Image: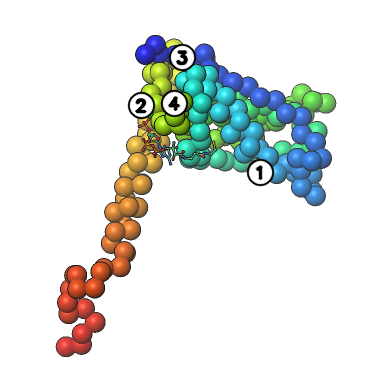
Amino acid sequence: MQSRTPSQSTSVLAHWMGVADANASGDIHGGTIMKLVDEAAGIASVRHSRRRTVTASIDRMSFLVPIKIGQLVTFTATVNAAWRTSMEVGVRVEAEDPRTGEVRHASSAYLTFVALDDRGLPTAVPPLSTETPTDARRAHDAELRRRHRLAEREAIEHGRSAFSPQPPGSGDATAGVSR
Ligand SMILES: CC(C)(COP(=O)(O)OP(=O)(O)OC[C@H]1O[C@@H](n2cnc3c(N)ncnc32)[C@H](O)[C@@H]1OP(=O)(O)O)[C@@H](O)C(=O)NCCC(=O)NCCS
């Protein structure tokens, strides 16, 4: 399968924030930002895979500064890494005050998307080939996040089995018996 570079799927959404996007104090709802982050990242994942994709997880999302009504917000989504059927997409959110031109980094997020075939089953995606040192750093960081995510899942599953109730008759027969 032909590899693709991050620049081939980079996607940008822009939204001019209005009253309907905000709470009573004029700050934009976190959920409004998350929806647009998901959309921008989804477009990048479809462009990379040329498949329908679903959001499997949002690994991390930070809100650095509040976004206000009247600001022009851009969501820049880049595929950081591609594995067998899944891809990590990073999204950088920038808020511009169009009257002053001041631009602030407002938020960042990392999402994992899975490509689906026509039956709705996970299907292979093209490998990612990096072009620039920034691409390579992002790919390296994405590998670390995936490794941590998988290790965390394994540790939680292992921990759960220690807390699951034992069926009657199994385990220590003397448990609860005073001696
Ligand atoms: C995401 C989904 C397709 C994965 O299905 P699955 O049966 O677990 O598939 P698999 O076990 O074969 O895993 C497929 C890939 O998904 C990845 N994956 C599955 N669950 C994941 C999760 N929670 N976070 C990150 N990656 C995940 C696996 O690591 C694997 O990646 P790889 O092939 O690159 O190694 C399925 O859980 C799903 O449909 N979820 C609902 C998605 C949805 O409705 N999103 C919101 C609206 S778009």
Q: Residue furthest front?
A: 119
Residues at badges 2 and 3 in contact (C-beta under 8 Å)? Answer: no
Look at the numbered disc 1 and give the secondary structure of its residue: helix
Could you tell me which secondary element the residue under label 2 belongs to? loop
Name the spot of residue 79 as percent of width and height, x first.
49, 23
On screen, residue 62 versus residue 122, left or right, reads right
Question: Which sits in the foreground, 114 or 160?
Answer: 114
Q: What residue is pinned by disc 3?
A: 5
Q: Judge by depth and name the residue closer to the eye, 154 or 96.
A: 154
Dot 3: within a 10 Å radius of its alpha carbon, few (fewer than 14), some, or many (20 or more) residues? many
Which mark is in front, 2 or 3? Answer: 2
Residue 167 visible in image: yes
Q: Nearer the viewer, mark 4 or mark 2?
A: 4
Rendering quarter of residue 160: bottom left
Quarter of the image where ligand 1 sits: top left
The residue pinned by badge 2 equals 84
Q: Nearer the viewer, mark 1 or mark 2?
A: 2
| 9 relative to 146 in the view: left or right | right
> Is residue 48 left or right of 148 when viewed as pictured?
right
Q: Amino acid at mark 3?
A: Thr
Please tell me whether residue 43 is drawn above or below residue 144 in the rendered image. Answer: above
Q: Which residue is mark 1?
A: 30
User: In what element is the residue under mark 4?
Assistant: loop
Q: Earlier in the sequence, mark 1 or mark 2?
A: 1
Q: Nearer the viewer, residue 47 or 110?
A: 47
Disc 4 marks which residue? 117
Gap in angstroms between the C-alphas marked 1 and 2: 31 Å
